[in-house]
């Protein structure tokens, strides 16, 4: 039987597990606080940010909601980041990506105080991750590591294929799988849009992590019997529904499920874990800042 990996359940465990640390912080007079900064009118980004804020409230993290007109000059965002960096009550800062085209996104990531960079995207934090000394692990790959551990999927010695080379998921995922510590020690292959014969590589994999942003690109024919399949994709495709679209992953779920040993669904797999690990990083940020 194929195991359906329940991201909602594991995310709930992560949130429950934060209770003690939040109580300890409260005893020291600190309420962990996350500032979310949204400079976009994209409905998907608006939804993601509001879900992150709801998650915060649920576990006792204070959410500061900052919205910036997407037509405002870039300096308005940079000044806001400077103010949040200087505010001792703010422990974590998340600028929802993507930002408008007239804003240099690399400068946004550099501008955030690395100690408050709960996404783990600042070059200092990226460097620490690559060096095997992560401060904040990026939320999606960190969440996937937790899902694999919870499903007792052994990464040590496993052939892991990461499909996608984004800064947010593919690259940090590959680095985490390479680490010499638990949840790492895999033999890692990173595939992308220029990879020749993708199927030949995914068919060899014990673990496939699909994070290319291409709807249903990995199907059962591309998998080894019993492989663990982690689907990071959330793609809107036109469909005859009330909203006019439906969400599908990067994995063709029905065909992959026939072959896989374990698989994450979309929704209800990786997505809830990404959000849970943001809370984790925010609590860690508050702890680091109250030491
Ligand atoms: N946009 C899509 N995913 C993310 C994420 O993990 N963090 C931020 N800040 N923006 C995103």
Image (cartoon, grey):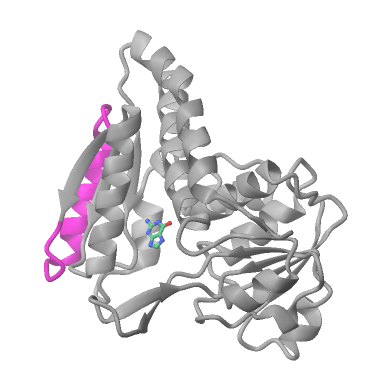
Q: Is residue 272 magenta?
A: no
Q: Is residue 79 magenta?
A: yes
Q: Residue at x 20, y 65 (%)?
A: 74
Instruction: Using residue 196 as the reference point, say whether residue 50 is left or right of it.
Output: left
Residue extending farthest top: 27
Q: Residue at x 69, y 43 (%)?
A: 149
Instruction: Using residue 44 as the reference point, say whether residue 28 is left or right of it.
Output: right
Q: Is residue 271 above or below residue 222?
A: above
- Residue 101 percent coordinates (x, y): 27, 76
In which quadrant of the rendered view does residue 245 lie?
bottom left
Q: What's the magenta region?
A: 68-90
- Residue 87 percent coordinates (x, y): 24, 32
Q: Is residue 21 above or below residue 133?
A: above
Residue extending farthest front: 1
In which quadrant of the rendered view does residue 212 lie?
bottom right
Instruction: Using residue 173 as the reference point, say whether residue 161 is left or right of it.
Output: right
- Residue 29 percent coordinates (x, y): 31, 12
Q: Is residue 217 above or below residue 111?
A: below
- Residue 135 percent coordinates (x, y): 56, 39
Q: Residue at x 30, y 85 (%)?
A: 240
Q: Residue at x 36, y 76 (%)?
A: 246
Question: Would residue 232 be seen by someone viewing this image from the given angle?
Answer: yes
Instruction: Using residue 234 as the reference point, say whether residue 55 is left or right of it.
Output: left
The quadrant where ligand 1 appears is bottom left
- Numbered-mark total: 0
Question: Would residue 138 be seen by someone viewing this image from the given angle?
Answer: no
């Amino acid at each position: 039987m194929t195991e359906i990996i329940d991201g909602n359940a594991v995310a709930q465990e992560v949130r429950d597990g934060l209770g003690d640390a939040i109580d300890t912080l409260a005893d020291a007079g600190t309420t962990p606080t996350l500032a979310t900064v949204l400079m976009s009118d994209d409905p998907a980004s608006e939804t993601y940010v509001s879900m992150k804020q709801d998650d915060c409230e649920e576990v006792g993290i204070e959410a500061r909601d900052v919205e910036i007109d997407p037509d405002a000059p870039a300096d308005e965002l940079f000044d806001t980041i400077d103010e949040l960096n200087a505010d001792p009550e703010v422990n974590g800062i998340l600028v929802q990506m993507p930002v408008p085209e007239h804003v240099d996104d690399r400068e946004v990531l550099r501008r955030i105080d690395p100690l408050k960079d709960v996404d783990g995207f600042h070059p200092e934090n990226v460097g620490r991750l690559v060096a095997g000394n992560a401060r904040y692990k990026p939320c999606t790959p960190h969440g996937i590591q937790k899902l694999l551990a919870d499903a007792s999927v052994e990464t040590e010695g496993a052939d892991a294929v990461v499909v996608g080379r984004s800064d947010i998921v593919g690259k940090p995922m590959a680095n985490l799988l390479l680490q010499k510590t638990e949840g790492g020690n895999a033999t890692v292959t990173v595939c992308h849009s220029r990879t020749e014969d993708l199927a030949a590589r995914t068919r060899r994999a014990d673990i496939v992590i699909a994070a290319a942003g291409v709807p249903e690109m990995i199907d059962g024919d591309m998998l080894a019997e019993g492989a663990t399949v982690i689907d990071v994709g959330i793609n809107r495709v036109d469909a005859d529904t009330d909203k006019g679209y439906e969400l599908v992953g990067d994995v063709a779920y029905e065909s992959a499920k026939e072959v896989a040993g374990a698989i994450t669904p979309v929704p209800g797999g990786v997505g809830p874990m990404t959000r849970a690990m943001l809370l984790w990083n925010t609590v860690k940020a508050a702890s680091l800042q109250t030491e």
